[in-house]
Image (tube, coloured by chain):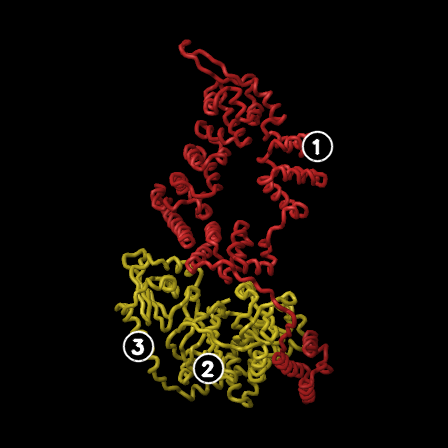
Amino acid sequence: MNLSEDQVLALAPDDSSHKSGRDLSAPGKWVSKGANEKAVWGECQGSGAKPYQTQVDLGNLAFKCSCPSRKFPCKHGIGLLLLRARHPKEFTVMEEPAWVAEWLSKRNEKEEKRAEKKDKPVDEAAQARRQQARQQKVGDGLEELSRWVRDIIRNGLVNIPEKGAAFWENMARRMVDAQAPGLAARVRGLGEVNFYAEGWQTRFLDRLLKIYLVIQGYKNLDQLPESLRQDIRMLVGFTQSQEELKTQTGVRDDWFVLAKKVSEEDQLTVERNWLYGLRTQRYALVLQFFARNQVPGISFTPGMVADATLVFYPSSLPLRALVKEQHLTRDPVRPGGYSGWQDVIVRETQYNSIYPFADEYPCIVSELTPVSHQNGWWLRDREGRMMPIRGNDGAIWQLLSISGGSALSMSLIGKENEYEPVGVWYNQEYKIL
Amino acid sequence: MQFWDELINTALLGTDKRPVTGMTLPGPLAAAAEAINGREGTDREEQFLQLASVALNFRQSGHIPLQGGDIHMTRAEEESLPYCSIQSLRLLKDILADEHTSLLHYWLLQCAAARRVVPPDWVPLLLNRAADRKLLRSPVMVVSGRRGEWLSRLNPAWQFSLAPREGEDIWQTGTAEQRKTFLRQLRQTDPSGARTLLIQSWPQENANGRTELLKQLSGTVIPEDQEWLMSLLTDKSQKVKDEARELLLQLPGSPVVLQHWETVRPAVILKKEKALLGMISKTTLYVEGAGSTDFQLLIGYIPPVYWEEHLGANPQTIIGFFQKGTDTGRYLSSLATAAVRFRDTRWALALAQHGELFHADLLELLPVKQQDEYCLSFFSQNVEAVIEHVRQREGEWSFELARTVLKHTARNPYHFNIHFYKENLLHIPRSIIMELAACAPPEDHLRAMWQGISEQIGKWVDLKQQTQIVFNG
């Protein structure tokens, strides 16, 4: 697997690691280095007598370094991969040294042990009681939420912008107490609407109605098909056992990483990785949650292709997935996509008829040209249909510059009447916006 | 989507104030509304929520993209120059991450000189940097190529990059600053033409405007200007008169200068005297009946070349007369002022080499080698002035000058912090890198600070050299 410089730098946990990693990408900083198809390794002279030993497992993009840094990956890991990206000939292909072989071997053993681990015997009766208690708590909480929603509708939205943070936070906490964290997040989302932006009323009402639908869905859970039942439970905040999910066969494919979005939620870092299966032509969303200064279990870099097996969470519209197994990372190839906006909206109508709760979908569309219209930027397909661009100025100018007024294939995230370009294919390369 | 707007209006007012029924709904929604409203025991809030939920999915499933018709985008022209190399872009990335404006400027100039352009995905980043820093605008536009030209037309924040307006257009319709800049630039290439333009527009300029425009002629006064400038000595505005007089004082042979010369000349005389009990004769300079500050000022208005004829000697000898004369040493700084005023490079060199004073203004008239020698001779007594001058210069400092400067700045890290070295990086020669350790101050705590700074300097100098190599081989 060969990561580009951009992909390596995207792994840096902060700006300081970015800078320090670059400083360590000079060949002179490394006393020894080597690589093969499994790993890259090197010894970097620090201030101490003994050089730091740094190694990277290329199969799963995992890092290990003997330096005392708590950052992950550390500057040595970044520097080593950056050096390899810039000067590949500096790395002689060879058998890994003992200190690398030992680490790789331990990693393989751990994976095997995880696969062999037997489930602990479960006290089913206790589990049933816990589930019953939770369902009661959730039911009570949703009743209260339902009354709150109806109060808002009765009194009108006109005074909503004046509500203080406590109005939202109090109800969100009530949902947390009711063990409905999914709805707690959605209630907080109501308070996060930008009430100064045009169209806030629609954005607010959309979010409120989705909360209402979840409540109604939960109240009538028994009447729903199994897949939609799973969706409602997930939206309320019931979790699915990842170990149980991983017992599924899963879908093995070469998964192209379209985009990665990182946000902070409840003191956790949430990473949204949008993937596209090159053979199955399926989209997937892999969420990773980790505390600050920790590294996610798997490093995804937009533009990379991972040969992996994903297992999808049960849903009427399976999109969210887990990585069951990662086999290799491959060199990027350019996927196909929709030929225009008509295909996208037909797909969306189909999706909404099954699952009306989504806030956004990924898609790849070929031959889109950015154009100016009504003081905004739009994407025009080859049939002349246009969709507005959602996104920050920086990404839009980047897109315009790369396009130069020509049509390009792009990956986008969005729905209905707004799409955000997140990556574009230009001269056989995937450029992240 | 009238149905959605109606729902929003109801939602805004609240179901207490506005009924859910009576909306204009499309067919499928109307059927749903009938079913919802017909259910018994459903209050208004419930009716609204159910109807709105159905309408939400109806709306989000039914969006039709706009048909673009004739809406198209102009295309950027193909680049005529090749893109710069991957190695040069890596360097650029490092330089941008360090927020190093002077190194960035250097990189841009090297790229432009090598006739390369940056790939399209770099253009917005560079245009943004140029929007913040005037220094970068011209080279950014060059290295951004045709893509940069095309892109900048789309963003008002990057309009600085549009092709410059024609001179006449600027003179007729530009802002005050633009007109002053234009006039100053035109004086360098066509001084008579610049004067003609100014005379033509003179009736339309107010007193302040006239004064400011006159100031742009300073340093470029030519004999052909004299007649017009003399006419301005009777201008209604005192400011204009003063400025015209200042300009005439830069013109050797102007009546104003000659008037001053008639005052000064008789007072400055050489006398042959006997010394050592009459065994030798020496020539001594006297300035009679003077000594006031006004007289010092007056000497500053006299073209130095006049002294050569008056005293019958060359500049070096005359300087010696003033140095050794009776109470005449004080006039040496006035001689230096005059050399600068009249841009007399012979006298500037003579004063630098033989004078015993440091006059910072002389530096701009000296060749680079002599500038360095002058600065080094007087460094310890005039540190601030020397450093101020060498910062403004173009090109690298000589090894000796760099060593002297860095030895001083290393001892004063609170005054000369890391930003000083960043700003002056392009002046620092690569050859000094091996000497950086030797520039360290003796005090331990300063030595530690210098170590960090010198490591950074080494890194930046290395980046500078790599930039040279990637573009020049």
From the image, state whether disc 3 or disc 2 is nearer to you. Answer: 2
- What secondary structure is marked by label 2? loop
Are the residues flagged by discs 3 and 1 from a single subunit?
Answer: no
Residue A280's disc number:
2
Q: Chain for mark 3?
A: A
Q: Chain for mark 1?
A: B
Q: Which residue is mark 1?
A: B235
User: How would you rate the neighbour count of disc 2 (Cα within 10 Å): few for under 14, some for 14-19, many for 20 or more?
Assistant: few
* Label 3 close to label 2 by CB (< 8 Å): no
Q: Is residue B357 above or below residue B288?
A: below
Quadrant of the snapshot with the N terminus of chain A? bottom left
Number of residue marks = 3
Mark 1 belongs to which amino acid? Answer: Asp
Q: Is residue B106 above or below residue B253?
A: below
| Left or right position of A73 against A155 | left
Mark 2 belongs to which amino acid? Answer: Thr
Which chain has been coloured yellow in this picture? A
Q: Is residue B348 above or below residue B29?
A: above
Residue A300's disc number:
none
Query: Does residue B19 show up?
Result: yes
Which chain has been coloured red in this picture? B
Q: Which residue is mark 3?
A: A109
- What secondary structure is marked by label 3? helix
Cα separation between marks 1 and 2: 87 Å
- Which quadrant holds residue B53? bottom right
x, y percent for residue B176: 65, 45
**Residue at the extreme left of the image, as rendered:** A98
Mark 3 belongs to which amino acid? Answer: Glu
Nearest the eye: B429 or A240: B429
Cα separation between marks 3 and 2: 31 Å
